Image: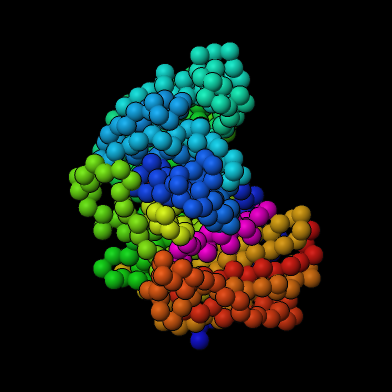
């Protein structure tokens, strides 16, 4: 068996983990909203049509913030269509996903739903087919107490209290030629800066996200961030990142290693933002909103042109394997490992569309394999992220070269002394023996070690077998301040360690 080592020390502090790192995303796309979170008439629907089985699962998943309403959808969306009496809401063509949008779920429903979930709202404004005026109207509708056209409309629609939405995305993926109203970096930067200035005039407490690149492969990646931030730096709080990964041509080793690309992507965006900071003599340091990330088998998607004006079609409903869940675990490790600069994370999406929760119309809801790593990280990664100094054997990969078999992240909650260690063995062929040096953590003892792994690494959960893949408890021991555990092949591991390090 190969051996790996790491040291946990409260002095090796990366930064405080923002609870917003464990966010999700609900887009009007496919069946995320309709028959996902919202299905009037479903046996488990409440009086507002929200599926309570999905609400329960989303609560268990532990999502802290939910971005809405898109995604590509937002760039041709009129938010006014989704408010007011349902019977008078228009049915529209959604050009992003060539779908029919009934508008039976809109802003008011989203706000009620998110309150029921107990999570924070995060809204995106349409800077594609619309602009500053509509964004300010929407903000007035949401956050102004009353006595004005838009705020009174909210009150008439049954919500007397302002929503108090803090987090706002200034458009979505505006660098992408697929985006309705796609712009150059210069055009978008100017539009975003002016929109941000007006929104802050209305409500100085808002936190604003400028669009970064849609992915690291975009030909404009890097120059886009620089050009946008040159115009918006003082007006925004975050720059967005989006990344999706999949296994290519059966190359599972490279797939298991792909979080090294996510790490490099994050570090590139930090460097670019810091370059703009230096050149512009800015004081503040910008943070990242990684507001779309996941495993997505995008090569199976026929593209927007393959879609044919259906309402809530079955779209990119990827069924995830054990391997996919382990890779999702490596993404969570990457996010926690950059807690000093990544403040917001949204796994895309919450239900049905590349999602941890799957549903059947009129039928059950269940946890996909990727549900489990997210739920564990959202529950346990609290307090300070610790730098995990590790020593690991390497795996040769075709895409990324030699990559450590072990990747790990850790947190220490100073209020309780609770420490969580998240560790992945990327080696598909053999277990990894891991020794964790805990001597810097007084009174350390292992509370639990949970593993997600399977002899069949392609095993999935589905409607017939909803709990076939789930974490299981295994044993480990601490001796002389050193913890020794075995990480099975291709496994996600969660270790809870109690300490006196308060
Ligand atoms: O999450 C699915 C889509 O992926 C989103 O609409 C878009 O922002 C991204 O390209």
Asked whether 403 falls inside the magenta stretch, the response is no
Q: Residue furthest bottom?
A: 1
Residue 388 image offset from top left, x and y in percent: 60, 64
Name which quarter of the figure residue 428 lies in. bottom left
Closest to the observer, 45 or 111: 45
Closest to the observer, 152 or 323: 152
**Above or below — where is 392 with respect to 99?**
below
Left or right position of 120 against 178 = right
Left or right position of 95 against 454 = left
Is residue 469 in sight in this rendering?
A: yes
The boundaries of the magenta stretch are 366-391
Asked whether 369 falls inside the magenta stretch, the response is yes
Residue 257 image offset from top left, x and y in percent: 41, 66
Left or right position of 491 against 475 = left
The residue at 51%/32% (across/down) is 108
**Above or below — where is 234 with respect to 471?**
above
Name which quarter of the figure residue 477 lies in. bottom right
Is residue 288 in sight in this rendering?
A: no
The residue at 50%/14% (across/down) is 149
Residue 278 image offset from top left, x and y in percent: 50, 34
């Amino acid at each position: 068996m190969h051996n790996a080592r790491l040291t946990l020390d409260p002095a090796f502090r990366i930064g405080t983990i923002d609870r917003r790192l464990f966010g999700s995303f609900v887009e009007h796309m496919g069946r995320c909203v309709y028959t996902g979170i919202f299905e009037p008439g479903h046996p488990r629907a409440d009086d507002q049509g929200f599926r309570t089985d999905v609400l329960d699962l989303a609560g268990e998943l532990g999502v802290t913030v939910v971005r809405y309403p898109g995604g590509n959808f937002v760039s041709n969306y009129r938010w006014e269509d989704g408010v007011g009496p349902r019977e008078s809401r228009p049915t529209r063509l959604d050009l992003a996903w060539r779908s029919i949008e009934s508008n039976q779920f809109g802003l008011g429903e989203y706000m009620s739903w998110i309150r029921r979930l107990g999570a924070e709202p995060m809204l995106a404004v349409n800077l594609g087919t619309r602009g500053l005026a509509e964004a300010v109207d929407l903000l007035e509708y949401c956050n102004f107490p009353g006595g004005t056209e838009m705020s009174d409309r909210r009150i008439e629609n049954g919500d007397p209290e302002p929503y108090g939405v803090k987090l706002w995305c200034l458009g979505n993926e505006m660098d992408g030629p697929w985006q309705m109203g796609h712009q150059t970096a210069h055009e978008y930067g100017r539009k975003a800066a002016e929109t941000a200035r007006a929104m802050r005039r209305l409500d100085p407490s808002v936190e604003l996200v400028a669009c970064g690149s849609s992915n690291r492969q975009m030909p404009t990646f890097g120059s886009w961030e620089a050009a946008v931030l040159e115009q918006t730096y003082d007006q925004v709080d975050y720059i967005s990142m989006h990344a999706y990964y999949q296994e290519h041509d059966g190359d599972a080793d490279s797939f298991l290693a792909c979080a090294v690309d996510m790490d490099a992507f994050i570090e590139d965006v930090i460097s670019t933002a810091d370059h703009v900071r230096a050149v512009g003599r800015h004081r503040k340091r910008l943070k990242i909103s990684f507001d779309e990330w996941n495993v997505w088998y995008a090569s199976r998607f026929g593209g927007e042109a393959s879609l044919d004006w259906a309402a809530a079609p079955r779209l990119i409903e990827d069924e995830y394997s054990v391997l996919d869940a382990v890779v999702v675990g490596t993404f969570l490790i990457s996010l926690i490992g950059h807690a000093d600069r990544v403040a917001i994370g949204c796994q895309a999406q919450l239900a049905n569309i590349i999602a941890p929760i799957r549903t059947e119309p009129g039928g059950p809801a269940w946890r996909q394999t990727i549900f489990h790593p997210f739920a564990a990280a959202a529950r346990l990664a609290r307090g300070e992220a610790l730098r995990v100094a590790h020593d690991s054997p390497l795996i040769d990969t075709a895409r990324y070269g030699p990559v450590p078999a072990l990747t790990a992240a850790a947190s220490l909650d100073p209020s309780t002394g609770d420490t969580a260690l998240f560790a992945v063995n990327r080696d598909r062929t053999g277990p990894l023996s891991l020794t964790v040096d805990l001597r810097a953590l007084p009174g350390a003892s292992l509370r639990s070690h949970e593993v997600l792994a399977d002899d069949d690494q392609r095993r999935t959960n589905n409607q017939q077998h909803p709990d076939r893949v789930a974490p299981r408890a295994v044993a480990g021991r601490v001796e002389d301040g050193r913890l020794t555990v075995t990480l099975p092949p291709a496994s996600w591991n969660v270790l809870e360690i109690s300490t006196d390090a308060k």
